[in-house]
Structures are given as C-alpha cells and as structure tokens.
Image (cartoon, grey):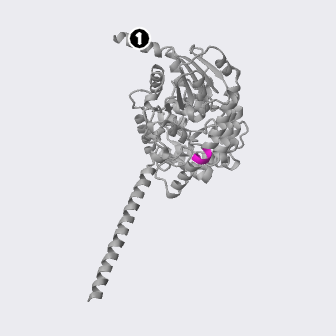
Amino acid sequence: MWLITFLSLLALTSGARILGLVPTPSYSHQTALWPIWKKLASRGHKVTLITANPINDPKLSNLTEINIRETYKIWTPMYKNMKALHDPFKINDVILPTLLAVSEYIFDNEEVKALTRNDTTFDIVIVETMFPEMLIFGEIFKCPTVCLSSMGGAIRVHESIGNSVHPVVYPELMLPYYKDLTFKERITSVLYYLAYKFRFEPQSLNVKNNALKKYFGENAPSITQLLDKVSMTFLDVHPALDGARPIGPNTVNFGGMVHIRDPQPLPKDLKEFLDASKEGVVYFSLGSNVKSANLKQEEFEAIIQALSDLPYKVLWKYESDDIPNKPKNVKFVKWTPQQDVLRHPNIRAFVTQAGLQSLEEAIYFHVPIVMLPFCADQEQNAKKAELRKIGKTIYPMKDGITKDALKNSIKDVIEDPSYRKNIKSLAEIMLDEPMSGVDKVIWWTEYVIRHKGARHFRNHILDIPLYQYFMLDILAFSISVLTILLVLVWITYRMIRNRVSAIVSARIKEE
C-alpha cells in the first residue's frame, strides 16, 4: 500500500508543468530566483519562465524561457527620478505607471499569447508579488497560484495572505524605519498606512483591474479576487536579518543567501589586481539599478577624495568611461562577478547601496559593509544591518556624502574587528537551517501541486470584516450597555435623592 501511495505522489510531483512569471526588469530580482527555476527543472518539472533575464543554460532542457528583456527600456528611465523613488509618499506615482507598462508588454507579447491559444496546460502558476495581475494566468489555466518575491512583502502582500500588518511594529518596507521608532516616525508610518489604504491601494487596484478588463474582457476577475485564491506566498527574507514577524502557514520565508552560486574563476585583470593588493581592497558597487555613473558631481568628488585617502586599493564598479581625476589606488571596471570578488581574501570592506542580495552576499562572505542607500527598501535594509552591527550607514538622500564621513566609515568597519566578527556570526545563524531556502520553495511548490492548492492554510481572518476584527461592534455594545447602566444609576440616584429630600422636607414642616 505504501508503495502505491509513494508512486502516486511521485506521479503528481515529477514532471509537473509550471509557469513562472518574474517580470521585474532588474538583474537582482531575477538572479535571486534563478536557483529555484534551475532546481525545479532539474527535478523533472517542465518549467516555462517569463523573465527579463533568461538563464540561457542549454543543460536545462526542461526550462523554456520567454525573454522580455525589452522591458528594461520601460524600467530603467524610472531611476532618473531618484528623489521620488526615495519618497515613500511619491514612489507609487512613479512606479505604478512603470509596472503597468511592463504588464501590458507581457499581455501583448506574442509568445505569451501563444501559451493561451494552444493546448498548453499548467499545474501551477508562480507569480512575482509586484505583479498580482499576472495571477490571471491561474484562471486561464485553471490551476493553483503561488506568489514569489526576491525580497520581503509589502503591506498588500501580507494583508492579502492574512498575515499581521501593523504600521508601528512592521513599517512598510519602503519606509526608512525598522525598530524603536520615534514618535515622529510612528506618526509618519501610520499616515503612510492610511495613505496606502485610502489612496495608493485603490489607485493601484483601479489601474490594474482596468488592464485586466482591457485584455481579458469585462468579466475578468478583479485583483482582489485573484489574490484571494493564492495558495501560498514565498518571501526571500530571513528573520535573523529581516526581523521576526508572525506569519501563517501559507507564507514561507526562504531567505538566507539562496542565490549564492559555486565559485568561478575571476577575469585575469581582476585576479591580478586583487592578488597583488596585499594591503587590502575596498569593493565599491551601487548595484544594478542605482548607477555610480549617475551620481551627482559633488557626490562623485566626495567619494573620490575619500577613496584616494585610504591606505587600501579600491575596486569600483563604474558604468562609464568618462572618469576625471582617477586616483592611483582605484581600479574602475564596468562589471564585476560580485560574488567571486567578495570571495577574494584581500577584500576588506564592501561599499554598497544596501540592496538585499548585496547585503546577503556580504554576509555570506563575511565582508563588513558601508551602506549608501538611495531608494526603495534600501534604507530599511541599512537600518536592519546597522542594528546587527555588521556595518555603518551614510544617508546620501538626507545628509549627502562627505569625504570624511565615507572615509571614516570605511576605516571603522575595517579596523574594528567586531564588524567582521558580527557578520560572520550572522552568516552562521542564517545558514543554520534544516533545509536550504531553495529546497523549502521546491518542497512547498510540489506540495501545492500534489494537493491542487493549499486552501486549507487560508487564514479565516480574511473573511472577517474590519469592524469585527477590531471588535468595534463589541466596543460599541459595551459602551452602550455601560452608558445605559450609568444613566439608570443616575436616574435611580436622582429618584432616591428626591425622595429623601421630600421626606426630610415633610419632617421639617411637621416639626
């Protein structure tokens, strides 16, 4: 009997057809999830992936990729408006039209349309959380859906799955707050939550619902209805860095450096530079979205002055050939294999924009960090890293970048051994798991496939009206009862007092 059960489960999970949609045209968003698609394909599943950064590995015969790299032309211009991207109250006005344009590109894509025209079927649809409209493919193929994120979850992500949301305890990840908020920060976080609930969310839902009707007809389900059917959500965060948060069984945190790959040989020029730099090397990179070449002139000059004063060599990922006044100790390169650079024993510190994947790579390779957060979730990431004393932060959008601040921060994290000790300890904690993050995602994906969904994990809090959740009816009832009792007591008191007064008055008259 057990053999039959085993074989039936194997048949359900081996060779399932999986549709993955990761539309965000951002290298870090894409590569962070590559190990998942590789593992699913290597386990015999037929994976079709819609992505802006195809893996292009001919050995993965079970992986079919639909290339939407053209969407970078839609996405990249958004970063010219860095001021708005830094302001959580304005970011929605910038990012919403961009997200919509990417979605429409996908809906118009002929290869994507072909999936719905032929006899293709899927057993599960996996959608990046930033694009809930893509959950429509679960309706088209009549299969369960799962949400996936290369970072933490925004308010909508947690609310839609039934997790706890609290603007003071768990500020929105786009806010530059994390723990021990000041009174002003608590007010700002609450105001942001109210702005989200009454402006940003309705605006976003309206735009995305209209897009679904445009492409799939007036009877297309709403975003709210699609989110309500999501079986599980996978978030690429680890509580040791991200912080503890109550989540339901339909949410899986799989973070913990899951995108770290096996070492590869460094390019010859980089290897020679790093090998020869016995005094140590500071690695400087602002990631794939925030470009060093787009720094303001005063920021660039302050950084150059700080780096040239260091007693170390510097490797700077800089995307332009136009570099004035190159210091002798700085090597400029347009691209680096970042993981292999951080692996090198001569790397002493990493100056980073505090993107989540960059932070995890620094943690994995035990490299202390100096953070220059510019936008989105970067400031909150920096707060979390600072709290764990693995690096120092300079806030360029608030305080600017000065030579002394950058120079002193780099020297502090290199010369104070506690930073390297703390980052090594954090790495050990994050890696001490019963299974890898990728294996968690694979196991639960196959679980959803086996059971054709995971509706049984759905939190019934989603069905409770807000007035019941906050017990407003009970509060109103209690106040009403208390008010009635007080009124009755007051009336009784007045009656007794009047009666006593009447009796006393009568006796006085008799005397």
Residue 415 visible in image: yes
Q: Quadrant of residue 319?
A: top right
Q: Which residue is at the far right?
A: 322
Q: Which residue is mark 1?
A: 7
Q: Closest to the observer: 403 or 48?
A: 48
Q: Which residues are magenta?
A: 196-200
Give the image location of residue 36, x and y in percent: 52, 24
Q: Which residue is at the far left?
A: 511
Give the image location of residue 374, x and y in percent: 61, 45
Give me the residue at 59% from left, 34% from top: 223
- Residue 198 in magenta stretch: yes
Give me the residue at 71% from left, 21% from top: 110
Q: Is residue 7 left or right of residue 84?
A: left
Q: Closest to the observer: 103 or 358?
A: 103
Number of marks: 1
Mark 1, secondary structure of its residue: helix
Give me the residue at 39% from left, 65% from top: 487
Placement of 290 over or under 138, stated as above or below: below
Give the image location of residue 112, x and y in percent: 66, 22
Give me the residue at 56% from left, 50% from top: 194
Placement of 261 over or under 487, stated as above or below: above
Placement of 295 over or under 186, stated as above or below: above
Give the image location of residue 451, x and y in percent: 45, 21
Q: Quadrant of the image for the C terminus? A: bottom left
Q: Is residue 333 left or right of residue 263?
A: right
Magenta stretch, main secondary structure, is: helix
Report the amino acid beneath label 1.
Leu
Q: Is residue 218 left or right of residue 235?
A: right
